[in-house]
Amino acid sequence: MKKVIMALCASLALTSSVLAQQNQSVTLGLEELIPGGDTHWKYVPKNVYGVQWWGNKCIFPTDDDVSAINPETGKKNKLFTLEEINKALSDKNLEKLHHFYYITFPFAEKKIVIIPLAKQYVAYDFGTKTITQIITPKENAENIDFCAANYSLVYTKGNNLYLATSDGKDTAITNETKEGIVCGKSVHRDEFGITKGTFWSPKGNLLAFYRMDESMVTQYPLVDIDARIATAEPIRYPMAGMTSHKVAIGIYNPQTGKTVYLKTVDPTDRYFTNVSWSPDEKKIYVIELNRDQNHSQLIRYDAVTGEKEKVLYEETNSKYVEPLHPLAFLPWNENQFIYQSQKDGFNHLYLFDTEGKLIRQLTKGKWLVQSIDGFNRKKKSILITTTGLSPLQSNAAEVDLKGHVTYYGKAQNGVEHVKTSESGEYAIDTYSTPNIPNKIDLIKVSSHKDLNLFTAPNPYEGIEMPTIETGTIKAADGVTDLHYRLIKPANFDPNKKYPTIIYVYGGPHAQMIHNSWQYDVRGWDLYMAEKGYIMFTLDNRGSENRGFDFESCTFRHLGVEECKDQMKGVDFLKSLPFVDANRLGIHGWSFGGHMTVAMLLRHPGVFKAGVAGGPVIDWKYYEVMYGERYMDTPQTNPEGYKECDLKNLAGNLKDHLLIIHDYNDKTCVPQHTFSFLKACIEARTYPDFFTYPGHDHNVMGRDRVHLHEKITRYFEDYLK
């Protein structure tokens, strides 16, 4: 028997060795490494979708069933199966459910799960195994916002907002017929933390919604070329310094069918952000901002009459104020709320009462709060995610009302995303580290005791992969540390000279390097490293998670300081013996596209080739909210706009430049690239150009593989 076991072990070892050799011979191409590729799914770290809370029980779905886990004991209790759900759906002649990704458990004490289908929202009682509610909005409904408290949902269609209820009624909340007026949709071009246009009150008795009048905004001409004769599909696009839209906030009462509008100041050149309800539904709070974005006001309104009651708090800054978060009321004290502000240089929590009195600053330091995740009602503490351990990380922490911060997450060297239980005593901690693709732990916050629910295997196990290094260099100011990522080919030879490509973004609200799986390396970076390139990325000043001074040093001259920092990255690369300084390339998209063009024009001769995707060329062609925050208007900052207008530098183009711009780009309109091409023609310089018809600000789906093959071929032509 012992000999048999030894022989079996030897056989398994030989098999493992053969498999490892086979895996090492695997070549990862664009189909494997780029979203949209035929086999990309094989190399994405596995995850469990739909893990959530049902009160204080953890919901854990599989492909076939859903279980509840006791967070104290770890004991699993199966609640229902996919087969049971589909039988109930079939009995009601409803479509089949294929997975549990988007189900929710809104009632802690009820055995009810909400199932969003393509055409209906369904409430399923898994105690009785029956469907209890069916809500059916109109065909092609958009912006659906379901309210569990009243089994109703609102949605938009065309210009208007509608209410659908479980009794089969479908009511028009608004009746706008004028083109350019829309209700219930996101406004202010999704800036200021705005992601939607409807806001149910806590108990579902009232609904706040945005009404946006953009009829006065200039229409920008885009074209659909799929028609036999191309058709115009214009969008309303307010460019910096031009007329912007006007927004109002309505309060709809489903019981009376009546709507009142908040009696705000004149909405001309004013932004209405971060709509928040009081717990008793009697008040509504709005953070309002002037067009210069340097003066914000937190204002309380009466939710019944719409009357303005009081300005609770004001904040000014010589550069800009950027409110991004709604109020968070303390569940144990409805007269106190948390306000988030970066007035001391970093986003922190401030405790106010409902009359606007500042009670205390709860968090402080040279780090920032990224989110409020929940509240522990027993301990009267707040659960947050912060950069307190490192600007490369997001870590789960608990802060009490005296400001004491304790980190309870399991990824002290990684990036965490947590969901807290209703009581705040437990958390689902989903995280990755540079060496862990994905892990889900169930944590008791007070004791930090954890139970592992899922650990993803390394999707590249057994494959010889490029090596990834990180470090810091000094910014152009000589003081600030900047984080970089360097990728070397798997068969790296330190005695060789390698062509090197900088992948750049560089703009606000983005960070390219985190202590997450493989340091945020993109599939194309791995692909190019496998083809024999060194890949380099640097998070310059102006990017995210380093505080207000770090971000705002670019104010009124976007792209200038950022280029200075990126050139420090170039100097660093040139100091490395394995980097071929005569074969440098650069690539970026959107703000990174601007940076790519700017680097070639401000530093001609440094790079042999660059590929710029969807670039901003002239900031006066960009939209009002983002553009004016960082650049002011062309009227008030003509020197800055002139300095940052890359058309003025078109004559400096000495290197190979490919610009790729999507034909139907609604974010960075094609005028940027076309005007630059015209400037280059006049300057007798010669960029290359490619477009993707039918795509918006980025190339998605199957065409994304084509995009990266196009980018790759350009560098192969001019760097190899």
Image (tube, rainbow, N blue to C red):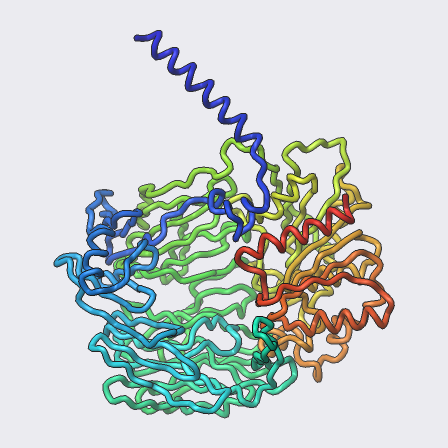
Residue at coordinates 67% horizontally, 53% vertically from top-left?
Answer: 710
Residue placed furthest toward the front: 228
Q: Is residue 671 left or right of residue 270?
A: right
Indicate left or right for 369 with 100 as reference: right
Image quadrant occupied by the N terminus: top left
Horizontally, residue 212 falls left or right of residue 470, namely left
Q: Position of residue 612 (x, y in %)?
A: 69, 60
Residue located at (71% from left, 31% from top): 493
Residue 623 location, quadrant: bottom right
Q: Position of residue 32 (x, y in %)?
A: 54, 44
Residue 100 visible in the displayed image? yes
Q: Residue at coordinates 54% horizontally, 55% vertically from top-left?
A: 702
Q: Residue visible at 33% across and 82% down?
A: 283
Q: Position of residue 380 (x, y in %)?
A: 30, 61
View extreme (right): residue:
684
Q: Front-most of 10 and 381?
A: 10
Q: Quadrant of residue 676?
A: bottom right
Residue 93, image quadrant: bottom left
Depth check, front residue: 61 or 556: 61
Q: Nearer the viewer, residue 430 or 350?
A: 430
- Determine whether 140 is above or below 519 in the image: below
Q: Residue 412, can we see it?
A: no
Across and down, in percent, residue 433 comes to 49, 44
Q: Nearer the viewer, residue 682 or 513?
A: 682
In what quadrant of the picture does the C terminus appear?
Answer: top right
Horizontal side of 71 relative to 481 (left or right) equals left
